[in-house]
Amino acid sequence: MYGRDPWGGALEINATDSATDDDRSRNLQDFDKAALSRNLDETQQSWLLGPTEQKKKKYVDLGCIIVSRKVFKWTVGCIIAAALIAGFVTLIVKSVPKHRHHNPPPDNYTLALRKALMFFNAQRSGKLPKHNNVSWRGSSALQDGKSDGSTTFKNLVGGYYDAGDAIKFNFPQSFALTMLSWSVIEYPAKYEAAAELTHVKDIIKWGTDYLLKTFNSSADTIDRVVAQVGIGDTSGGPDPNDHYCWVRPEDIDYPRPVTECHSCSDLAAEMAAALASASIVFKDNKVYSQKLVHGARTLFKFAREQRGRYSSEMKLQFSTIRLVIGMSLCGLATTPGIAKHAGAFWGGPDYGVFSWDNKLFGTQVLLSRLRLFLSPGYPYEEILSTFHNQTSIVMCSFLPFFTSFNRTKGGLIELNHGRPQPLQYVVNAAFLATLYSDYLAAADTPGWYCGPHFYSTDVLREFAQTQIDYILGKNPRKMSYVVGFGNHYPKRVHHRGASVPKNKVKYNCKGGWKWRDSSKPNPNTLVGAMVAGPDKNDGFHDVRTNYNYTEPTLAGNAGLVAALVALSGDKSVGIDKNTIFSAVPPMFPTPPPPPAAWKP
């Protein structure tokens, strides 16, 4: 029996269903190909054709979830693209220089401090180091000592030239070193913040190395010290000298006499003060510090045993208290007889004026510090309280409410009463006023009394700021009296090295006069030099030949550096209360140990 394939094509059907599976299989293959010309759906195709090549799955089994293959591809692609973008961005970020957190820009006092220290680099004598960083300076005076057959000191190379000439004076040079050391002892953190601590210590060591050459520093007892190298004489004598000749220090070829002294207590004591102060600065270098201490002891012994005057007045007091700091001479420093001899209770127009040749007020400030922080009590209290009261009185005289000192119309205090070269006294006063203000703050004292009136410590700092601001340009002439600071400063500084060009021409003694008398600006900039300053009418003449206006000095710049570092940076960073007294032994006897515990 034959039946009709409902899908098309003939099928043979056996009634008895006796056909084998192979027969049925062969019959199925005898399909009507014409019938397949019609479109078949998937069910028909799968039934007719049986298993065929499977189509790609549209879903992906991820184990816990089944997702569309298309979605899966997009997801993986996006992840890869994101990873590539992130890696590219990371590469860019790493390749770009990092912007580190910077401290706030330095204030004017810090900027001026950095320049003021550069002046000492320009004043160096001897074989200059490679890092001296003053392009127009070179090694000079390499025959100092050797050129004078009468001296026993043959190696006097080094040290600093005093001012615009080439003379090396031990007295003002020692004072300058003492001031620098004092400022480092009080404000090491501020020097560190200004990145100048290493520099200032290098400046101090250059000077103390030289001072150790100017006497027999290895001996316990000496009979002479060098007072100066070089000589100044403007009379026009037959022999060239360091005042008559106007030449660069590098071109000096004439003999430089050495001046020795055998009884100069004030000079030797000043040198001792410089070495004693520096010994604290270099306390971490035990060998060098002890060498400085030994030299200071030797000089001070000479000062006390070989009595005599180098300057017009003998003032041992400042050296004495500096040695108190480095050693243990508190009893000597507070002896009423010495205080009276030093003029601690005298008045006079220059009372309270601290300078290289009058150390009294600096001594009073230091002894006030001793009282504030060590409180030695009996038997020192009476004399220390007297010094402390004197300090307070002088601080009162700096304030505009009092009439001890006049002021110019521009506000500059006239500590030298209208005489020339005022700034060296002003910077010293600014330093001591700021320092005393910090002493009181460290002692938790908000101020002090001037008669019946109480004044805050801020008033002292404000006084110091107004004076230093005047020097830096806040004055009627709008001129900075520190060379290289600001846009308007003296261009014709009274200075041989700065005024004679470095042009490989060696000028003789008189040949350099044309540079001295020229009205042109100096060819070399004496960065950081504080000139002598204006007159009592705030007037200033930028004239090279007038040293009363335009000559800088070691002592003046040392006071400027001290004042600037005291005012610089964060006000909350005060003094180092302990270092300056680190070498002072206990002032009270050590109490006996407690008795042993009682045993039955």
Image (cartoon, helix red, strand yellow):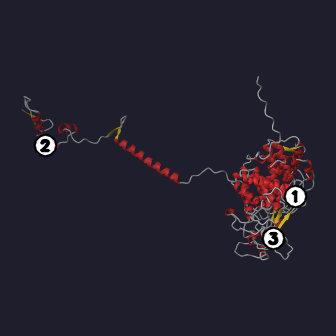
Question: Is residue 34 at all visible to an observer of this figure?
Answer: yes
Residue 72: x and y, percent?
A: 37, 42
Q: Residue furthest top?
A: 600
User: Who's the residue at 79% across and 41% down the image?
Assistant: 444
Residue 397: x and y, percent?
A: 88, 51
C-alpha span from label 3 to label 1: 25 Å
Q: Which mark is residue 33?
A: 2
Amino acid type at circle 3 is: Gly
Question: Is residue 356 at all visible to an observer of this figure?
Answer: no
Residue 465: x and y, percent?
A: 79, 53
From the image, which quarter does the C terminus lie in?
Answer: top right
Amino acid type at circle 2 is: Lys
Q: Which numbered mark, 3 or 2, is in the foreground of this view?
A: 3
**Residue that numbered label 3 is attached to:** 149
User: Who's the residue at 89% across and 42% down the image?
Assistant: 379
C-alpha span from label 3 to label 2: 137 Å
